Image (tube, rainbow, N blue to C red):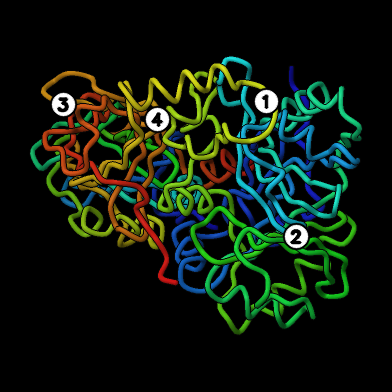
Amino acid sequence: MSNPQQLRYTKEHEWLSDAVDGVATVGITEFAANALGDVVYAQLPAVGDTVTEGETCGELESTKSVSDLYSPVSGEVVEANQDVVDDPALVNTAPFEGGWLFKVRLSEEPKDALSSDEYTALTAGN
Amino acid sequence: MSTAPRLTALDALHRRLGATMTDFAGWDMPLRYASERDEHNAVRTKAGLFDLSHMGEITLIGPEAVKALDYALVGNISTVGVGRARYTHICREDGGILDDLIVYRLGESEYMVVANASNAQVVLDALTERAAGFDTVVRDDRDAYALIAVQGPESPGILASLTDADLDGLKYYAGLPGTVAGVPAMIARTGYTGEDGFELFVAPEHAVRLWEALTKAGEGAGLVPAGLSCRDTLRLEAGMPLYGHELTTSLTPFDAGLGRVVKFEKEGDFVGRAALEAAAERSASKAPRKLVGLIAEGRRVPRAGFPVVADGQVIGEVTSGAPSPTLGKPIAMAYVDAAHAAPGTSGVGVDIRGTHEPYEVVALPFYKRQK
């Protein structure tokens, strides 16, 4: 699997797009989606919620387990992906595209983001 | 204590297939190959191929093998004909369940006991001790067999293309020695999926050849390799208990709603008889809790250990829970207070990380195949 170069990443396996007009998109990586197995339920932050970098903001439930969703950045949620709420399997089939989770209006730049290469190195041992 | 996990004879093959592996009872086993939901649905509608080599086989041979088993187990093994199998339990003196087992009668005085991987040593030790006064050998055959299961509605056709054995004559819970894909095998019509299917006990050195032959034979029929993850959701839908979840040493078969496996009418004493007679009486008059099915109204999944609640009070505990691919909703098995155990009881919920999610109480199983 390859992690798109233009995205930034976290150690908790979320990705973050470059902000356009101050709004960035958040999802989980393909590595995380594979580790979870079939995602069956996504609890995403609601529009208007304030999220904080490194803190939990939702959960993803798979056949075997439930995992906390961490926000890779601080800001205000401006959109949650209703397609994923309706069909959580999108997280598995298209984690970097149609399986995105929510969009945030950034209140500050992320402090701990990793580059694609750094994230790839982090997960290479697995 | 940390030891390297044991590998089955099919280990290299699983890795080649890209399986996600998991530690299970000290074995490194395939959890899933791709999507566990797809594997689950394949077994329900077509066929799935499982490596179950972690299961523990113990053989009893001798003129008094059957007497030893009747004494050691709660079932009436004397009534099992040659070539037939029986689901049963082995209990402690206090009636607590040590394991659930399948006993296959392989010959006039030869029986194979199949125990759960996590309990195989306990069962071997108990059988060895309990059989000591009988004219029988108790043999540890855990390393003598690999176990491959082919399960699902297409499995009879797939297997029939590889064997001359009389599969039509092989009933559910029967087993016969035969040859499959040129490999000697004990062919059993058993499984843990709620579907028709077969379990093939073979020498480990023949496992790869058999797996590959089954894979090829199943190509046109939609057979896929299937891991332990879907095995768990398949058995849960079928309402089958799993040791360590629905069955534990602190429960008797009567507590687990499986009192029918205890045969008081059999000849002679058996380990746990007195305690089980008391348990049977208790269960008939004032059962504290009952095993029920729960179906979610929402989408959050109950897990083992989550409290079952009604009117803000804890009234039970989830023993197994998963999203059900067949029902399209989360389901669970749970022990709940008798007052809330009737199907249709309203106001029952599961405490999922602090939120009380509404659940419907139903009778088990969740799924029964059309025959």
Q: Which mark is residue A112?
A: 4
Residue type for callout 1: Phe
The 10 Å Cα crowd at callout 1, few under 14, some 14 to 19, many 20 or more, is: many
Query: Of the residues shown, which amino acid type is indicated by label 4?
Result: Asp
Instruction: Identify the subunit bearing mark 4.
Output: A
Q: Residue at x 21, y 43 (%)?
A: B343
Which label is found at residue B270? 1
Q: Is residue B75 above or below residue B250?
A: below
Whether marks 2 and 4 lie on the same chain: no
In the rendered structure, find residue B83 and report the number of the disc placed on it.
2
Q: What label does residue B144 carry, if any?
A: none
Left or right: A106, with A95 as reference point? left
Q: Quadrant of residue B187?
A: bottom right
| C-alpha separation, residue under disc 3 versus residue under disc 1 | 40 Å
Callout 3: chain = B
As measured in the structure, the alpha-carbon distance from the residue carrying label 2 to the one carrying label 1 is 24 Å
The image shows residue B126 at horizontal and vertical percentages of 75, 24
Same subunit, tags 3 and 1: yes
- Mark found first going from the N terminus, 2 or 3: 2
Question: Disc 2 or 1, which lies upstream in sequence?
Answer: 2
Which of discs 2 and 1 lies nearer the camera? The answer is 1
Chain assignment, label 2: B
Observer-side mark, 3 or 1, equals 1
